[in-house]
Image (spheres, rainbow, N blue to C red):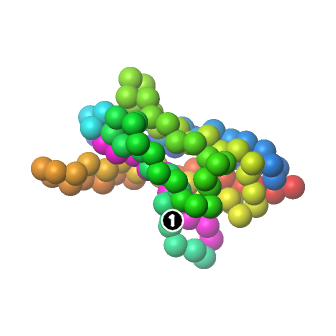
């Protein structure tokens, strides 16, 4: 059974930090590219950060560059999102996604974890 389980969300003050984790099971994690998305109330889901299957390549949305860092541990089957200098605009549900390309494209999603940035 494929599972992506996010954790690490919560309430933090502006300027604070959180580290999200996404534990994967039920599929070959090491061959999947992983991403973090977020969705704020009334807004569409948007890409936050992505990392290649090996962890050698990362990409970030402009609004988190220099503040967030994505990393991938292919031994622990976990992807992380270190979030620093958090702003109220970062408040959203954060989702983990796993994606594989050819020969059979597959996409898996986690259930999400709430991040609230407020004083």
* Point 47% across, 51% down: residue: 59
Q: Residue furthest left?
A: 103
Residue 88 figure quarter: bottom right
**The stretch drawn in magenta includes residue 33:** yes
**The stretch drawn in magenta includes residue 57:** no
Pick the front one: 53 or 45: 53
Q: Is residue 10 visible?
A: yes
Pick the front one: 1 or 12: 12
Q: Position of residue 108 (x, y in %)?
A: 34, 51
Q: Is residue 26 visible?
A: no
Q: Which SS type dominates the magenta stretch?
A: strand
* Point 36% across, 43% down: residue: 52
* Point 12% across, 50% down: residue: 103
Q: Residue furthest top?
A: 75
Q: Looking at the rendering, in which quadrant would you find the N terminus?
A: top left
Q: Which residue is mark 1?
A: 46
Q: Position of residue 2 (x, y in %)?
A: 31, 42
Q: Looking at the rendering, in which quadrant would you find the C terminus?
A: bottom right
Does 23 sit left or right of 43 as displayed? left
Q: Position of residue 31 (x, y in %)?
A: 27, 38
* Point 62% across, 55% down: residue: 64
Stretch of the chain drawn in magenta:
32-41
- Element type where label 1 sits in the image: strand
Residue 43 figure quarter: bottom right
Pick the front one: 106 or 71: 71
């Amino acid at each position: 059974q494929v599972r992506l389980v996010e954790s690490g969300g919560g309430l933090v003050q502006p300027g604070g930090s959180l580290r999200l984790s996404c534990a994967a099971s039920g599929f070959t994690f090491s061959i999947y590219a992983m991403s973090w998305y977020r969705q704020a109330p009334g807004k569409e889901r948007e890409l936050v950060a992505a990392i290649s299957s090996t962890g050698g390549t990362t990409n970030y949305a402009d609004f988190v560059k220099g503040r967030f860092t994505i990393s991938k541990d292919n031994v622990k089957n976990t992807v992380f999102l270190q979030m620093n200098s958090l702003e109220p605009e970062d408040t959203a549900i954060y989702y983990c996604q796993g994606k594989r390309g050819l020969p059979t494209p597959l996409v898996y999603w986690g259930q999400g974890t709430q991040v609230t940035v407020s004083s």
